[in-house]
Amino acid sequence: MFTDGPTDSPHRYGDRGRTRLCVWHPSDPPSRRWVPADGLLALFGMVTEHLFKEAWWREHGEWLGDEHPHGPPEAAAA
């Protein structure tokens, strides 16, 4: 998933100016990830929550919720 706006976030990656959102970890179980059967509203909700957490992090320096150590997706999956 890609988004415009501020890119300073510990949960973004990619070669397009850090515009890709890291919403879930590749090793997360399906219950913590979006799957097509969940529908688009669920995906929009996950993205909205992620962007709120980014805004909070920029203002308060604290990430709300769980975090996994990660880097580029290839490194995280290894």
Image (cartoon, rainbow, N blue to C red):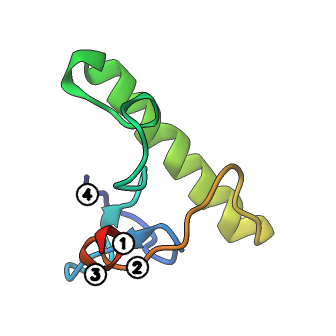
The quadrant of the rendering that contains the C terminus is bottom left
Residue found at x 30% / y 68%: 77
Identify whether 35 is placed above or below 68: above
Q: Which secondary structure, mark 2? A: loop
Within 10 Å of the Cα at label 1, are there few (<14), some (14-19), or many (20+) other Cα atoms?
A: few
Q: Name the N-terminal-most of marks 2 and 1.
A: 2
Residue found at x 34% / y 31%: 43
Query: Are discs 4 and 3 less than 8 Å apart at CB?
Result: no
What is the distance, in whole Å, between disc 1 and disc 3 at their CAs? 19 Å
What is the distance, in whole Å, between disc 1 and disc 4 at their CAs? 19 Å
Within 10 Å of the Cα at label 4, are there few (<14), some (14-19), or many (20+) other Cα atoms?
A: few
Instruction: Give the left or right position of residue 13, taking residue 54 as reference.
Output: left
The disc labelled 3 sits on which kind of residue? Gly
As drawn, the label of residue 71 is: 2
The disc labelled 4 sits on which kind of residue? Phe
Q: Provide residue 64's location: percent of width, then percent of height.
A: 71, 52
